[in-house]
């Protein structure tokens, strides 16, 4: 039997100011003093490069919240800058049950305080806070009473705050508005109380709240429609800069297909004139609690009862995923958590789904990208809380292994690193997050100098037919780089295109089940493994990291005008270590190469010091022949007709320190023997014999076999 853990309440976040794209490096965040059942990550909020993370279970549910700054430096996983607690905190307060950050301030809810009457706390100066700190201001409801659960949800926008109390009035619920929090002191009560005009017991209005400027969206997931229970709804409030007393909604938001148990409004988020509401109980036929989320536009003019503009679902939704348990909206981008999603055999590992362009379109839409924790395991509940602000996101996994087993963890990353990075000169690192994209993954669409590094242990997947990975997609998009130290799965990978230069794919990990094409202006390098590979006109393959082996798990095709930048340290040694080697499991196809349509092999000596006695290329002896294995194809070589298929450029060889002209009258050429392709040097300038007839102790052939001409000659004479 599988036991599903359910959080005691919502993970509510606020997206206030829409921040410009930042270079957030995805990484796991943990509490330095974390303990089991702290539930660090049960609530998260991101504002710019500052993250606020709640751990309401800490210290016997006294609770705590943790501040992380400089998440936009790309320098690695950050550690907390400050630990926040309530000055009056006691066991059971659940401080950190809800959190919200905006600019330099934070708002933290503690619904268990004072016999579940609840409190909320304002924290200021988040840009300088360090060590352990307490609140600047305490917020309470003027009519607070036991079991009101004031602070179960919070949202902060500028200097205004909104606090939900869904237990008020027999759980009909309410929310409380506070203004002037930038200068408030001590303990303050609300400026206005927000309620639903059609409030009823157990509506749970205020279970979720979100404030954007002077507009609020408040969820009531227990709202019944006649005898249809728990359909759920959300309410829009405007003009909150002047609201006073008790006010009711401007508009009510419902789902056009609402049904019993949907729980619309369990999580809500507002950004500008749009709202997003989760309905984690939405069932698809007999498949229960798959979950969905609903987009509502035009909140600035909405009136009466309105239905959604767009419904969001997961392409792989399954029973009890609870997609929509947490939601966050920033501009036109949405993030939806499904904290009980099973990932492979890991029950309740959890996931989050990214949606782009929510300002347009209707009907039902599936995600652009699915996000998971790279180190995820069963019951970690990744996606129990989510927050997105501009280009950055923050996702909580409250039962993940952080400082200790089950203490919780949070993950941060950037939208552009998993979609399209085209800011120009931007750098992103993906570490801690794996993703599956249903769209193209683009590094440099029209700008220069963008770079993404997929760190080891992380996986990127582009799944849909016709979708591809592009590095320097269009003409004029130069010097863009994708570094794959982890694993990339994609049907098509295109590096460079006609009209651009300097675009690079660096593979030190693996790229599986893919067709990689190195086009004009593109280069493949690194010592990892790629799928089938084509080096096209103007494209370049440069194996290893000076030097090394490029592994190809499939066929390798060399087209006319392509380039092989071949580097060597020594004249003797191991292929792939002392000089570059391409090793393919499939066929090396040279059939497109003819006289006049050659493939370019550019020779480079890496030695810049003087001659030595260890066979280094700086001690190149141009009086004897040499041979290097430069390509091997287990599936065989097709289309080889001779050296005239190749244009061998020796210019770089000549300028190396230690010798002025190692070539003399000699020449380089290419030969084939079985499944191997060789680069040969002949001091006489004549055609080089096939392998096995070479004279020189430095003769090198495939593997560890060295056939010495002297021994062969002796056998022939006996």
Image (cartoon, helix red, strand yellow):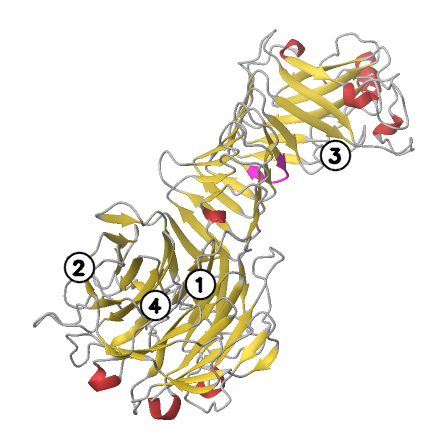
**CA distance separating discs 1 and 2:** 30 Å
Is residue 343 visible to us here?
no
- Residue farthest to the left, as pictured: 227
Q: Tell me which segment is drawn in magenta.
A: 525-529
Q: Nearer the viewer, mark 2 or mark 3?
A: 2
Q: Which residue is mark 1?
A: 395
Residue 479 screen position, x and y as percent:
60, 34
Is 641 colored magenta in this rendering?
no
Q: CA distance from mark 4 to mark 2?
A: 18 Å
Please, is residue 249 above or below residue 553 in the view? below
At numbered mark 2, what does the secondary structure look like: helix, strand or loop? Answer: strand
Q: Is 249 on the left or on the right of 701, as rendered?
A: left
Q: Does residue 367 appear left or right of residue 303 in this picture?
A: right
Q: Is residue 317 above or below residue 52?
A: above
Of labels 3 and 1, earlier in sequence is 1
Q: Nearer the viewer, residue 10 or 651?
A: 10
Q: Would you name the residue on which mark 2 appears?
A: 306
Specify the quadrant of the image occupied by residue 448.
Answer: top right
Please name the residue that numbered disc 3 is placed on.
574
Q: Earlier in the sequence, mark 4 or mark 2?
A: 4
Q: Secondary structure at mark 3?
A: loop
| Above or below, 187 relative to 152 | below
Which circle marks residue 210 in the picture?
4
- Gap in angstroms between the C-alphas marked 3 and 1: 47 Å
Q: Main secondary structure of the magenta part?
A: strand
């Amino acid at each position: 039997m599988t036991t599903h853990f359910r959080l005691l309440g919502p993970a509510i976040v606020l997206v206030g100011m829409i921040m410009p794209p930042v270079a957030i490096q995805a990484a796991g965040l943990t509490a330095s003093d974390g303990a089991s059942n702290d539930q660090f990550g049960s609530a998260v909020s991101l504002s710019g490069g500052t993250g606020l993370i709640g751990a309401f279970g800490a210290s016997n549910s006294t609770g705590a919240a943790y501040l992380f700054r400089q998440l936009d430096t790309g320098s690695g996983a950050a550690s907390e800058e400050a630990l926040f607690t309530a000055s009056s905190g006691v066991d059971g307060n659940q401080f950190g049950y809800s959190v919200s950050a905006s600019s330099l301030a934070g708002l933290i809810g503690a619904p268990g305080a004072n016999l579940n009457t609840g409190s909320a706390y304002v924290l200021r100066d988040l840009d300088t806070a360090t060590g352990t700190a307490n609140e600047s201001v305490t917020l309470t409801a003027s009519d607070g009473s036991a079991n009101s659960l004031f602070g179960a949800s919070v949202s902060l926008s500028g200097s205004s705050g909104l606090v939900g109390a869904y237990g008020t009035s027999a759980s009909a619920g309410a929310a409380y508005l506070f203004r002037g929090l930038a200068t408030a002191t001590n303990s303050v009560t609300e400026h206005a109380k927000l309620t639903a005009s059609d409030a009823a017991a157990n509506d749970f209005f205020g279970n979720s709240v979100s404030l954007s400027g002077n507009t609020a969206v408040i969820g009531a997931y227990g709202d019944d429609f006649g005898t249809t229970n728990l359909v759920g709804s959300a309410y829009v409030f405007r003009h909150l800069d002047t609201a006073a007393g008790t006010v009711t909604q401007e508009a009510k938001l419902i789902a056009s297909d609402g049904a019993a148990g949907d729980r619309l409004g369990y999580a809500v988020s507002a950004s500008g004139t749009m709202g997003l509401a989760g309905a984690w109980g939405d069932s698809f036929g007999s498949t229960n609690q798959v979950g969905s989320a609903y987009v509502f536009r035009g909140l600035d003019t909405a009136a009466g009862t309105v239905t959604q503009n767009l419904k969001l679902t997961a392409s792989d939704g399954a029973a009890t995923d609870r997609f929509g348990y947490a939601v966050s909206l920033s501009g036109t981008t949405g993030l939806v958590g499904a904290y009980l999603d099973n990932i492979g055999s890991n029950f309740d590992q959890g996931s989050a789904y990214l949606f782009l362009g929510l300002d347009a379109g209707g009907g039902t839409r599936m995600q652009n990208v699915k996000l998971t924790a790279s180190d995820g395991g069963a019951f970690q509940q990744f996606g129990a809380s989510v927050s997105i602000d501009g280009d950055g996101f923050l996702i909580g996994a409250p039962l993940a292994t952080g400082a200790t087993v089950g203490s919780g963890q949070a993950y941060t990353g950037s939208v552009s690193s998993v979609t399209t990075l085209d800011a120009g000169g931007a750098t992103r690192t993906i570490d801690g997050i794996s993703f599956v994209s249903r769209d193209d993954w683009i590094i440099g669409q029209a700008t220069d100098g963008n770079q993404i590094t997929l760190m080891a242990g992380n996986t990127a997947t582009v799944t849909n037919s016709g979708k591809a990975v592009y590095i320097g997609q269009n003409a004029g998009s130069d010097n863009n780089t994708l570094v794959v130290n982890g694993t990339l799965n994609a049907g098509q990978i295109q590096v460079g295109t006609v009209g651009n230069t300097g675009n690079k794919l660096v593979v030190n990990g693996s790229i599986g089940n893919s067709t990689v094409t190195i086009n004009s202006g593109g280069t493949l390098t690194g010592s990892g493994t790629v799928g089938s590979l084509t080096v096209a006109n103007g494209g370049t393959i440069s194996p290893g990291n000076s030097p090394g082996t490029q592994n190809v798990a499939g066929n390798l095709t060399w087209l006319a005008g392509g380039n092989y930048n071949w580097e060597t340290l020594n004249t003797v040694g191991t292929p792939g270590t002392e000089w570059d080697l391409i090793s393919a499991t499939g066929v090396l196809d040279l059939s497109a190469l003819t006289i006049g349509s050659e493939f370019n092999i550019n020779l480079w000596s890496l030695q810049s010091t003087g001659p030595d006695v260890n066979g280094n290329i700086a001690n190149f002896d141009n009086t004897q022949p040499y041979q290097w294995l430069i390509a091997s194809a287990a599936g065989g070589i097709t289309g080889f007709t001779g050296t005239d298929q190749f244009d061998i450029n020796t210019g770089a060889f000549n300028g190396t320190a230690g010798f002025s002209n190692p070539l003399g009258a000699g020449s380089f050429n290419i030969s084939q023997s079985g499944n191997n392709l060789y680069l040969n040097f002949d001091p006489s300038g004549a055609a080089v014999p096939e392998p096995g007839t070479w004279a020189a102790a430095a003769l090198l052939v495939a593997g560890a076999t060295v056939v010495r001409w002297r021994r062969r000659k002796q056998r022939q004479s006996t």
